[in-house]
Image (cartoon, rainbow, N blue to C red):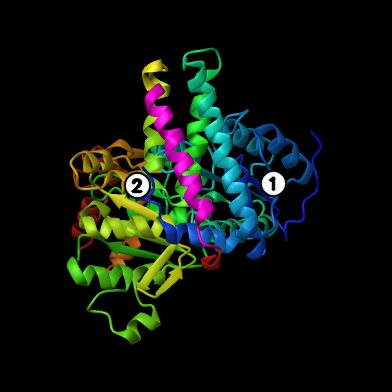
Amino acid sequence: MVSTILDEAALGALLAIGGESLRAQLLEDLQTCEDDLTEICSTNSIAAPGSPKRLRQALHKLRGLALTIGAPHLAESCAAAEAAALTSPTDAHLPRVAQISADSRDLRARISQFPKETT
Amino acid sequence: MNAVPRDDARPGLLLVEDTPSIQMLYRTVLTKAGYPPVCASSGTEALAKFNEHRPGIVLLDLMLPDLDGLTVMAQMLAVAPETRVIVITANGSVNKAVEATRKGAYDFLVKPLGDVRLVSAVASARADSLAAAKQARGSSGQDPETTAGNFVALSDQMRAVRTVIEAVARSKAPVFIHGASGTGKRTAAEAIHRLSPRARRPIVSFKCASLEGHALEAALFGTGPLVTAEQSEQGDCAIQRAEGGSILLRSPEALAAEHQARLLAMINSATLPLSPSRSLPVDVRILCASSRDPHDAMRSGLLSEELFYRLFVFPLSLPPLHARIADIPVLAEQFLPEIAQQEGKHFNAITPEARSLLQRHTWAGNLHELRNVLRQAVV
């Protein structure tokens, strides 16, 4: 779960800079990453043609987002999955990828609920 | 490709970031700071906008959806080598950023990226770009031998060293100079500084092994119980004295773990915290010199791995004196008048026999030993 390790001060600082339009874009970007990860998991084959590259790109993008938002634990999970997918693109990683996608959803929910008045 | 004329007084900025929210964030921060960027979301778009606008500074995310960031950077530098490319990478991909710096990137930034660090990197690149343009206009045809000061390089080994020095001088990235005691590490660092756009600002040498604990904290970072509020206000620590210039950290592996962590944090944030409520932006180029192999220092735990990768961007290895015998007579003739003056004697030249003798010696103590031998001869 990422809920315990979201750095709310970091998120607050970001939203103070970019306001509601940045919040909306962050949510959209997280959603895009999740969609990519979900699609890869639903085909149930990381090794399918094109999937390894897509997976690594989605994980890398999510890692950058998580670091920026203030969710270092999610970023670490993405980095570990990215490294694993690079060295052995096998379906053994599917449960880990599904968990990352779930953590991203949780993070998205928290960003949505983050109080506007602190931004 | 058509070359687009560029106003060097206003080096534009190209931001290449494929994640829309992060691009939006950086664009907002940079625009508020007075550096509104042109933006691109892919490698192909970046190259097209680069050719269209020919910016002086490029902020480049290394992981792009269509092209490798290093390839994009190489293509930009091939067309306009004076471009300052600042690469951005996620924490944990520092090796790739180091590789980029070796291939010509001006600086690198690691996510998560604070707004101060982002603006500071762009401001520094801009100042550097303008200084280089001014220098190029005012000093064409300058002899590197002269601009490198006392740096003697007649031997093939030292010519190679000088080539590296001239190549890295323009960058802002750290250089790690390694060589046995007396091989000229400090002279090499001074040559890098003198050839850099920072030459008009100071180079401050700091011996990391000479102090420890609070005394080191005060001398290097300007904080701790030994620093009064007044001293803190005056900014009399090594890093502050080097502002705008370079700091030469001698034997950085001798720093305690806590001070290494502080140095790393300073590099990452480009700020120097003077108190819990007060931080100063820092624009200092870091040069390191050590007689200890930096890889060994990292492997043995003396130098933290993370700090190693931030400092060991451009390695520069200096050969021992016996491996550069062509330089020995020139070095001796450079030292001799100075030593003679100190000793109240009059020696201005060396006989051919003495030269030959000097070139046959093994010089285990390198330049220190050469100076000692000359002093003994003079006295």
Q: Mark 1 lies on which chain?
A: B
Does residue B12 lie above or below B211 as drawn? above
Quadrant housing residue A74: top left
Q: Mark 2 lies on which chain?
A: B
Residue B191 at x, y = what percent?
A: 44, 54
**What is the magenta segment's predominant secondary structure?**
helix
Looking at the rendering, the stretch of residues picked out in magenta corresponds to A94-115
Residue type (three-letter) at the residue carrying disc 2: Ile
Count neighbours of disc 2 (C-alpha within 10 A) and say few if under 14, some if 14 to 19, many if 20 or more: many
In the foreground, A67 or B214: A67
Res. B39 mark = 1
Question: At 54% across and 47% down in the image, what residue appears?
Answer: B106
Quadrant housing residue B139: bottom right
* Whether residue B286 is visible: yes
Residue A39 at x, y = what percent?
A: 54, 23
Asked whether disc 2 touches disc 1, contact meaning CB atoms under 8 Å apart, the reply is no
Q: Earlier in the sequence, mark 2 or mark 1?
A: 1
Let me know if marks 2 and 1 both belong to one chain: yes
Identify the secondary structure beneath mark 2.
strand
